[in-house]
Image (cartoon, rainbow, N blue to C red):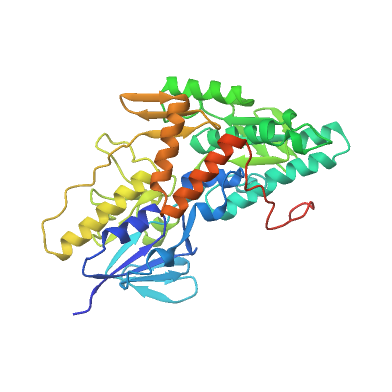
Amino acid sequence: MQQHHVVVVGGGFGGLQVVHGLKGAPVRITLIDRRNHHLFQPLLYQVATTALATSEIAWPIRRLYRDRQEVTTLLSEVGGIDRQNRNVILTSGETVSFDTLVLATGARHAYFGNDAWEKHAPGLKTLEDATTIRRRLLLAFERAELATTEEEKQAHLTFVVIGAGPTGVEMAGMIAELAHKVLPPEFRNVDTRKTRVLLVEAGPRVLPAFTEKLSAYSKTALEKLGVEVLLGTPVSACTEEGVKIGDDFTPARTIIWAAGVQASPAAKWLDTTSDRAGRAEVGPQLNIPGDPNIFVIGDTALVKQEDGKPVPGVAPAAKQQGGYVAEVITARLASKTEQPAFHYRHQGNLATIGKSAAVADFGKIKLTGVLAWWIWGLAHIYFLIGTRSRLAVAWSWLWIYLSGQHSARLITQKETLKDEA
């Protein structure tokens, strides 16, 4: 009898957890991803803001499974799913058959119908996004150094972050620290301490997933770093010259999008129901309606909790879902009774604001300041893959903490001062 074939699409937190959970099960596994690496997305903003190098938060997928002979890794992109014939259709035209399919294809940033803004306001989901933002940040200071008028200098020294969730808050805080504390001694024609960092949020407060008290603390901490927090006013335009916030236009050459996400087209591939964000609706065992052998997890899935609220699109949730699906597959192959419905265990919310301030919400326990910052750091180091990465990130953070210097300030890819195409 041919061994049961599990195809996992997506090498993020959810996809890798499925593969980890199936170790020792009587299956062969094909893992498909359009990139050759697994990315630790919670620290992606630190690559964008020059604190960490790309190699410290990403690992080649093939290296992770070099000792798992039952795992085959394919570097390819999925273009569709043939449910009837049980095939994954690759954009190259080839097909991969499956007995069980797990889609963990993640999400991209959404511009709420204003896709033309992406050129001027890149989001942050991939290493390419991070290095693009890093290049634009560093080039902004270089261009300010060369500017001949005060208006031009200030436009280059104005940074706008749109969206005040954890990514936006963390990004704004790091840019402010970079401009106000790290760079001033290095420039001669421009004072980087005059940099404006604007954090724009359409809602009434920053970090809306946290309590009002922690949200208020975060806003105050950002303002102490020099971030201007603009609440209750949405952005109405993004151009190469700047942003329009409500009715007011602000000249700014660097804009960063952290305001929303759109799920991958997995629901369209499967021709199944989805919500407004494109997330595929799944049942209690995380399979799509009418097909118990096709699972959707992570940011691609709309998973309802007992209270009817959706499971948040965070890394711990994706890992829990991946582990659960592996248990369901293993139990079915062993002819055991069906697993109970998936239950999400909330492990708390963490967000950092600059070098020594953070907020932590563990339900009854809520922390702020330096203690929360240490907990945030230890938690992220713990979830990194491999001793080498943990030591490298810990050393980078210790160096920044003691010296105040960021070590990854390299302008890469297009090393030019010309306007990007």
Q: Which residue shows up at 74% across the image and 56% down it?
A: 415
Q: Is residue 4 above or below residue 412?
A: below
Q: Is residue 347 above or below residue 22?
A: above
Q: Is residue 346 above or below residue 104?
A: above
Q: Which residue shows up at 16% across the image and 62% down it?
A: 332
Q: Which residue shows up at 77% across the image and 55% down it?
A: 416
Residue 323 showing in the rendered view: yes
Q: Which residue shows up at 31% across the image and 37% down it?
A: 346
**Quadrant assignment, res 233:** top right
For this view, does 83 lie left or right of residue 77? left
Residue 40 showing in the rendered view: no
Counting labels gives 0
**Quadrant assignment, res 338:** bottom left
Q: Quadrant of the C terminus?
A: bottom right
Find the residue positioned furthest to the bottom: 1
Which percent across, then down, holds residue 90? 45, 71
Which percent across, then down, holds residue 268? 41, 58
For this view, does 164 lie left or right of residue 317? right
**Quadrant assignment, res 293:** bottom left
Find the residue positioned furthest to the right: 148
Which percent across, then down, holds residue 15? 36, 57
Q: Quadrant of the N terminus?
A: bottom left
Which percent across, then down, holds residue 340? 16, 48
Q: Of residues 79 and 358, which is closer to you in this image? A: 358
